[in-house]
Amino acid sequence: MHAVPLAVPLLLALALALQVLWHSLQSPPVARADALPPAPSATTIRAASFGESIAAAQLMLLQLQAFDNQPGISIPFADLDYGRVMGWLNTALALDPRSGYPLMMASQLYGQVKDTTKQRLMCEFVHTRFIEAPDLRWRWLAHCAIMAKHRLQDQALALRYATDITLHAGAASSWARQMRIFILEDMGEIGSAKVLLGGLLATGEVTDPSELNFLTERLMAMESLEN
Amino acid sequence: MHITTIGKYTALEALRTRVPATALLTLALLVCASLFVRELAVAEAARFQIAFYAAAARLCAVFLTSVYVLASISREFNDKGLEVVLALDVPRSHYICGKLAGFMLAAVLIAVLVSLPLWVLAPTAAALMWTASLVIELALVAALSLFCVVTFSQLLPAAGFVAAFYLLARSIDAMRLMSAHPLIGAEAPSQQVMNALIETLGYVLPALDRWTATAWLVDAVPAPAALGGIALQGAIYLALLTSAALFDFHRRGL
């Protein structure tokens, strides 16, 4: 190995120090909530990513996240144009239909703002995309049903979502498929709830003993309420 | 004296190995492709054409410069041309500085050639800023490629490192934004380590996404001070890469 002249490591150290100094003098990058552009179409992204549509969808979603979760934005989600947000989520879902990430973002992130119009917009988005693949996407609609019941105080909307899960998502967990019954009960529709619960028990769909016991107790409680 | 001679012959080599012809061919292909894009657009056709051409030309120019530098030095290593030059009692630092000067001349030529259509399509001030920024960017890419090929000796790892470095430098600001405030697990040690790592990378990488921006051509020309900042950052980073290349080249046994 040859000896390195002293000037070279000195120059290297000086240049490195200058680079670090330069970086510390620069203002940090800041995202602006109004900077979200319209979403590109899925066809464009598919062509631009040379067929790597899943990776492109994931990068799109991470980029979308970067717009609303940055320092300097006090009310990040509420400031965004929700029409454009839906465009981005739609494109990402079109590129990677098996991913639940766009629906998770819609129901659990963008649906958490205090603006009820925006909450409803996100729930309708989830509902529309749920119908296309119910068995794959039921959990996000279940979250929206709970949101409609407790946050939006809209029992009818909650019932519509819960009913669609029961009717379309055969692979959904039993708690989600039974949600309709308890919403009906809360709405005072004891008769309808009783019929549905009785039907559920009669079909033998529920096999877990603890769950069976719980549901039977609920049915008996409803009957005693009616009497 | 040695530096000037080596630089002159390196630039001459670039001319004789059809670098300008390749740049012109690239220019012609990109102009055709941008005309196609212009025809497809139903509105803002000129904006579409300029944006497409500028983004594609920038990437092609970087690719061309980097591959040229890597191939030229690799060939010199393989043909034992380096040994011949150093046998003439040329100091190693002169060899590196001369080569870099020659490559930078070639980079200027490539930058000016690929920018020509923008002088017609975009406002003059914007085209001037964009071209100047591309010259600095290509000079930096030439220095980076020289450092990599001197350090790794082999073409493949050197090209891989240059590509990774360039992509990282173009996206480091976006990565800093994403890692600074994650949606979940902000307090998790893994997240903090990742954030610290990305912030450290930010210190040692030039933020190339702020350079040679297409927005300058289609939206608003930045203040000339922006170009001054890019030139200063370019000079610092050029000194860093050159000294790193010199350090490795001096340690190298021939």
Image (cartoon, coloured by chain):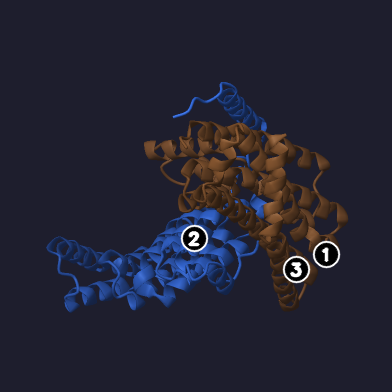
Chain colours: A blue, B brown
Q: Are marks 3 and 2 on the same chain?
A: no
User: How much space separates mark 3 and mark 1, taking CA atoms?
Assistant: 9 Å
Identity of the amino acid at label 3? Gln
**Can you identify the residue that label 1 sits on?**
B121
Residue density around tag 2, few if under 14, some if 14–19, many if 20 or more, within 10 Å: many
The answer to which quarter of the image holds residue A43 is bottom right
Q: Position of residue A116 (x, y in %)?
A: 56, 58
Mark 3–mark 2 CB contact (< 8 Å): no
Secondary structure of residue under mark 2: helix
Q: In the displayed structure, does residue B105 sit left or right of residue A78? A: right
Rounded to the nearest angstrom, the CA distance separating label 3 from label 2 is 35 Å
* Alpha-carbon span between mark 1 and mark 2: 42 Å
Q: Are marks 3 and 1 in contact (CB under 8 Å)?
A: yes
Residue A82 in percent (x, y) is at: 60, 61
- Residue at left 75%, top 78%? B39
Residue that badge 2 annotates: A106
Asked if residue B42 is positioned above or below residue A79 in the image, the reply reads below
